[in-house]
Amino acid sequence: MASPGARLASLDAFRGFTISSMILVNNAGSFPEAYAQLRHSSWHGWTFTDIVFPFFLWIVGVSLTFSFAKRKDEGADRGKLMLHTLRRSALIFGLGLLLNGLPYFQLDTIRIPGVLQRIAVCYLIAAAIFLYTSVRGQALFIPGLMLAYTALMHPEGYEKGSNFAAYFDSLFLSGHMYSVTKVWDPEGIISTIPAIATTLFGVLTGHLLRSSLSEKEKTAWMLFSGNFLVQAGFVCDRFQPINKNLWTCSYSLLMAGLALVVFGCFYFLIDVKGHARWSRPFQIYGMNAITVYVLAGVLDRMLGLWKIGATTADMLLYERVFLPMASPINASLLYALSMVLLLYGAAWLMHRRGWFPRF
C-alpha cells in the first residue's frame, strides 16, 4: 500500500500510456490514409485521438498536487513555490516555441500557441490556484471557469471560424497561429480557460489519492465520479457541443470523466492489486514524458523536412518500408508504431542511465 506521499506507479504508467498514445496518433494521422480513431474529429465530436491531450493535462493536475501539497502543509514559502512554478512553466513554454520554430525560426510567422505552451499555462495557473486557495476554492474554480467560458462563447456560437475564440485569437495571434487553420488556433487563448478546469479536475483527484481513505474506497470514488462526469459531458453536449478544438465545457467534463475511469483501473490493477509487470514499459515512458515528447517533435519535424530526392524522409520510409508490407491505412499504423517503439528505446536508455530531466 502506497503512503500518501509515495510515488504512484499507476500514475507513471498512465502518463506513459498517454504520451505513447500521443506519439502514435501524431505519426499515424500525418499520412493520407489513417484509421479514423487516429485522427482528430474534424469539428464537433471526438475520437481516441481527442482524449490524449486532456488526459495529459489531467495528469499534470494530479502530479501538481503530489508535488506541492506536502510542502504547502509544512508551511513552505508560497512565493518561492510560485517562483519555481513560473520558471518551470517558462521553460516548458520555451520548449514549445523551440519545436514550433524548428529549423528556420522565422519569428515573424512562428506559431505561438501549442501543446507544450498550453501545458505550461495550465500548470502555472492551476498551481497558483492550488497554492493560494483551499480544496473548496479549487473545486469552485472549475464551474467558475466554465461559466466564464460559456459567457464569452455562447452568444457567437461554436461553428468553425465564426466564434468568439477565433475572433479573440485573430486580435492577439494574427500571423502566429496553427499553419493548417491560419485564422484560428486549436490551442488558442479562450479555449485555454476550460483546459485549466481539466487540470483542476486532476488536482482534485490528487487530493483524493492523498486522503486517508482506503485504496478500494479511492478506486470506487474515482470510478463513480468518472462515470458521473462522463454523463454530465453528454448532457452538456446538448447545449454546448463536445469539441476538442474549442475545448468546450462538455468536452472538458467528458475527458476528465474518462481520465478518472481509465486511471482508476490503472490504480486498482497496479497499486491496489499489485499487477504491475504489464505496465513497466508505460512506467518507463511516463518517467520522462516531456523529454520524450520533445524528442518525438524534433524527430517528426526533421523527417518531414529532410528530402531524399523529391520525397521527404518520412514519406520515403512509409512508401519503401511499410507500404509493401500492408495496405495504406495499416502501413500508416505500422509507421506510427515503429516511432512509438523507437522513442521507447530512448526512454528506456534514459531510465537505464538514471537520467530524468525536470521540466
Image (cartoon, rainbow, N blue to C red):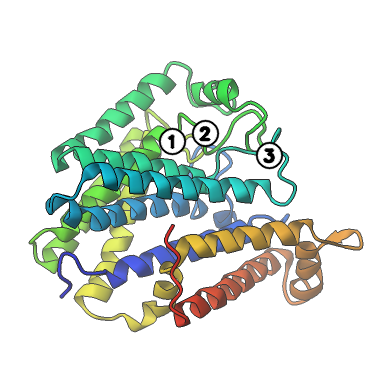
Residue 134: percent from the left, percent from the top?
Answer: 15, 40
Q: Could you say whether the residue bearing mark 1 is in a helix, strand or loop?
A: helix
Q: In which quarter of the image is residue 148?
A: top left
Q: In the displayed structure, does residue 92 sit left or right of residue 174?
A: left
Q: Could you say whether the residue bearing mark 3 is in a helix, strand or loop?
A: loop
Instruction: Look at mark 3 in the image and give the residue it sits on.
Output: 180
Residue 249: percent from the left, percent from the top?
Answer: 36, 35
- Quadrant in which the N terminus appears: bottom left
The span from disc 1 to disc 2 (Cα, nearest Å) is 7 Å
- Quadrant in which the C terminus appears: bottom left
Q: What residue type is labelled 2?
A: Gly
Please tell me how crowded label 2 is: few (under 14), some (14-19), or many (20+) other residues with Cα within 10 Å: many
Instruction: Look at mark 1 in the image and give the residue it sits on.
Output: 192
Q: Quadrant of residue 43?
A: top right
- Residue placed furthest toward the top: 155
Residue 187: percent from the left, percent from the top?
Answer: 52, 38
Tell me the residue at 13%/52% (across/down).
Answer: 73
Q: Which of marks 1 and 3 is in front?
A: 1
Instruction: Look at mark 2 in the image and give the residue it sits on.
Output: 188
Tell me the residue at 18%/37% (across/down).
Answer: 133
Tell me the residue at 59%/26% (across/down).
Answer: 161
Residue 299 appears in view: yes
Query: Which of the two labelled residues, at mark 1 and mark 3, occupies the earlier sequence position?
Result: 3
Please tell me how crowded label 1 is: few (under 14), some (14-19), or many (20+) other residues with Cα within 10 Å: many
When the figure is inspected, residue 51 is found, relative to residue 350, above or below; the finding is above
The span from disc 1 to disc 3 (Cα, nearest Å) is 19 Å
Nearer to me, 214 or 238: 214
Q: Do the residues labelled 1 and 2 touch (CB within 8 Å)?
A: yes
Q: Which amino acid does label 3 sit on?
A: Val
Query: Which of the two labelled residues, at mark 3 and mark 2, occupies the earlier sequence position?
Result: 3
Tell me the residue at 68%/38% (across/down).
Answer: 179
